[in-house]
Image: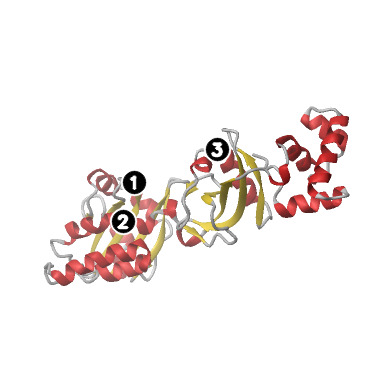
Amino acid sequence: MAEITLNVRQLQAFAEVGYQAAGGGGARGAMAALRRVVPVDAYEFVAFDPASGRHHSVVSDGHRRIDGDAAEEYAGLDAYRTAMATRAPVPMPEPGTERYFRRHLAPYGWRAGLTAPLFLADGRYTGLLHLAAREAFPELTGPLVAAVAPMLAHVTDLTRCVIDPVGLPPGFLAAAYDRLGVRREVPGVARSAVLWDEPAIARLARAFIDSRELSRRGLWLDRGGRWHEVRVVRAGVGFQGSIQGAVVAERPCSLPYELTGREVDVLTRVAAGDSNPQIAAALVLSVRTVTTHLEHIFAKLGCDSRTRLTTKALAEGLCRLDV
């Protein structure tokens, strides 16, 4: 292979790697730009999932076949531990990688391999980039790949990827969750600090993901005594939205219809189908007090039956969420 030389055009290619990795064209766009500088015949991005502690292949090109267990097998090698310690690409075949090389690269015609650990600029590990070539890599390949690795790390950052949170209203702050409770930021939406730091919201999201609901809305009283209007919608999270998840969005609010907190509690029980005695027992109130609260609720919401009251409460998100 020809030796690598750096010129203005190739430096521009490095800038293009950063743009593509940040969202312009994703993994394939970033690698197309990198190939202007590094002679690569095949590549594979391997993401590290912090929820499971495991690696898995997410994007590849040039490989005729990717073995499903290859990522975890590599993570068990000394070469992986060396890469993690030095944060530098490790070439193959090298001592300790021969068996892996023979199994996953040599059968497909590759004579050289290079694996770069991917760390974001803030030091967080997101995965690996495997490169393969039909001839030996030029001498500067390792340092050049190491230089762009912090940009390429965004491709495998599963904690920030949320796809299509359908129905997310404007003006809300948000956080996304998967079934394991792993939090993710929602691209294009400001993060809600009050949701981010509340474990009960993660439990709410998990219960929602396991339900058959497409969306949920309601009222939430945070630990500081502030009410929030909350929306929960389904969303794909993880790489390319491959994991079932939910986006929880909130904005501070005053209680609608001049309801009191206790009236919200009573209304929530009514919408759940409880009778007055059941509501009284659940809220530790007398039946007479529950009846008085209901009279006020009927008047404030302009309803004349429990059925209409329930319909309005569910449609407008007037019930207190079970958080």
- First along the sequence among labels 3 and 2: 2
Distance between the Cα atoms at labels 3 and 2? 41 Å
Which quadrant of the rendered structure holds the N terminus? bottom left
Residue depth check, mark 1 versus mark 2: number of the one nearer the observer: 1
> Label 2 crowding class (10 Å Cα cut-off): few <14, some 14-19, many 20+?
some
Distance between the Cα atoms at labels 3 and 1? 23 Å
Please state the horizontal and vertical placement of residue 102, each as a whole percent of the image.
29, 60
Please state the horizontal and vertical placement of residue 87, each as a whole percent of the image.
24, 48
What kind of residue is marked 3? Pro
Say which residue appears at 30% left-offset and 45% top-offset.
123
Please state the horizontal and vertical placement of residue 136, each as a whole percent of the image.
17, 66
Q: Nearer the viewer, residue 289 or 22?
A: 289
What kind of residue is marked 1? Arg
**Residue 199's mark?**
3
**Residue 124's mark?**
1
Secondary element type, mark 1: loop
> Label 1 crowding class (10 Å Cα cut-off): few <14, some 14-19, many 20+?
few
Say which residue appears at 78% left-offset and 38% top-offset.
266
Q: Nearer the viewer, residue 311 or 204?
A: 311
> Label 3 crowding class (10 Å Cα cut-off): few <14, some 14-19, many 20+?
few
Say which residue appears at 56% left-offset and 43% top-offset.
202
**Residue 100's mark?**
2
Q: Are marks 3 and 1 in contact (CB under 8 Å)?
A: no
